[in-house]
Amino acid sequence: MNAKTLLTAAALALFPAVAMACPAHDTAAMSCKDGYKWDDTKSACVETVTG
């Protein structure tokens, strides 16, 4: 094997570890439809009760 092949293989082997270290995987952006709000305890949209 030549050096180029070894470096390519090493880079491909490290990609998953680098991707998991990315802080963007800790947060997600989403919105609930009208009349619903996000409930952190249930990790889901729940109907907003009024009145």
Image (cartoon, rainbow, N blue to C red):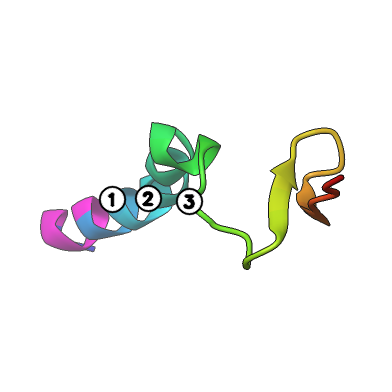
Q: Residues within 10 Å of mark 2 (few under 14, many from 20)?
A: few
- The mark lying in front, picked from 3 and 1, is 3
Q: Which residue is mark 2?
A: 15
Magenta stretch bounds: 3-7
Q: Which residue is mark 1?
A: 11
Front one among 3 and 32: 32
Q: Which residue is mark 3?
A: 29
Residue type at numbered disc 1: Ala
Residue 22 in view of the camera: no
Q: Quadrant of the C terminus?
A: top right
Which residue occupies 75% across, 35% down? 40
| Dominant SS in magenta | helix
Which residue occupies 51% across, 47% down? 28
Q: Residues within 10 Å of mark 1 (few under 14, many from 20)?
A: few
Decide if residue 38 is on the left or right side of residue 44: left
Q: Quadrant of the N terminus?
A: bottom left
Question: For residue 9, what is the image quadrant?
Answer: bottom left
